[in-house]
Image (cartoon, rainbow, N blue to C red):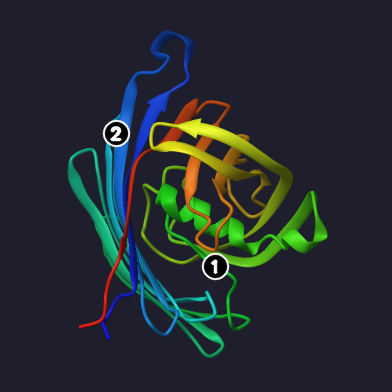
Amino acid sequence: MSGVTDSLIGELAYTSTAPDRLGKERGRESFRIDIHPDGSKVISAHCEIDDPPAVVRDVSLRLDAMGFPADCFVRIAVGGTFRGSAWFNFSGAQAECEASTTAEGRISQRMSVQRPIPAFGNHAIVNDGALLSQYDLSQGPGTQIVENLLLSSPDHRGATGPMLFEVALAIQYHGLETIDVKAGRFEAHKFSYTDVPGLPLKHPSYDLWCTTDCHYLLLKAQVGGYMQTHYELARLDHIKHGST
């Protein structure tokens, strides 16, 4: 049996929706999702935000067979300079972080949590899609609150830390739509993040569309307010690995 059963490999385009920059490239993200025979999943991404100060982020998040966060690695550079890196581990009733940052120095965090924690936000846009799996679709359209969500940074662009930060997340589900993106036509669930209680600065409105399969793959998203950003799936390859 191969060590991986399926891989989803793709790219997300970041563009501006500001009137003076409408449609202009403002960043990009390449990602890979590997599904293992035991049902666990690894979501890896390389993210680049060009708007100053530029942010470069590399993340690798492992979800266990039940879909709960098991561990994660995050490294960020801001303004062309290394900002910090961290390893996160989630086990028992504890979340751990071992980090080294230019602002805070060497950090060891231990946080008591409910186990399993529902999700971990590492600021990769593909991971923003995966977080939508926390909504219970059996309840139909409406708004649900996810408690005890952990982030790698409270900054809207994920440009601080990385280190543990706890918030809640309000997710609104609108229903099904058929949408066209650069990667093709898809049936999609439409969601919105309507509030992130616990952030030091209120997050702008955030609408997201994701696939209707078990992967909740982000198809497109739009952030309003001062961010004025559009994200769109530009390429997707689905590789099925055979037995060895």
Up/down of 135 relative to 98, above or below: above
Q: Quadrant of the C terminus?
A: bottom left
Could you give the CA–CA distance between mark 2 and mark 1, rounded to whole angstroms?
28 Å
* Residue named by callout 2: 53
Coordinates of residue 133 in the picture (x, y in percent) = 60, 61
Q: Nearer the viewer, mark 2 or mark 1?
A: 1
Q: Along the horizontal axis of the image, is 90 left or right of 24?
A: right
Residue 159 placed where, x, y %? 36, 47
Q: Is residue 94 left or right of residue 159?
A: right
Res. 123 in view: no
Q: Earlier in the sequence, mark 2 or mark 1?
A: 2
**Residue at the location (43% across, 14% down)?**
22
Vertical side of 70 occupied by 136: above or below? above
Say above or below: 206 vs 173: above
Rendered residue at 54%/80% (across/down): 66
Q: Nearer the viewer, residue 143 or 216?
A: 216
Q: Name the residue tied to disc 1.
A: 119
Q: Label for residue 175?
A: none
Residue placed most toward the observer, 223 or 140: 140
Q: Is residue 198 left or right of residue 165?
A: right
- Please tell me whether mark 1 sits on a helix, a strand or a loop: loop
Q: Amino acid at mark 2?
A: Pro
Q: Nearer the viewer, residue 229 or 219?
A: 219
Q: In which image quadrant can residue 35 be found?
A: bottom left
Residue type at mark 1: give it: Ala
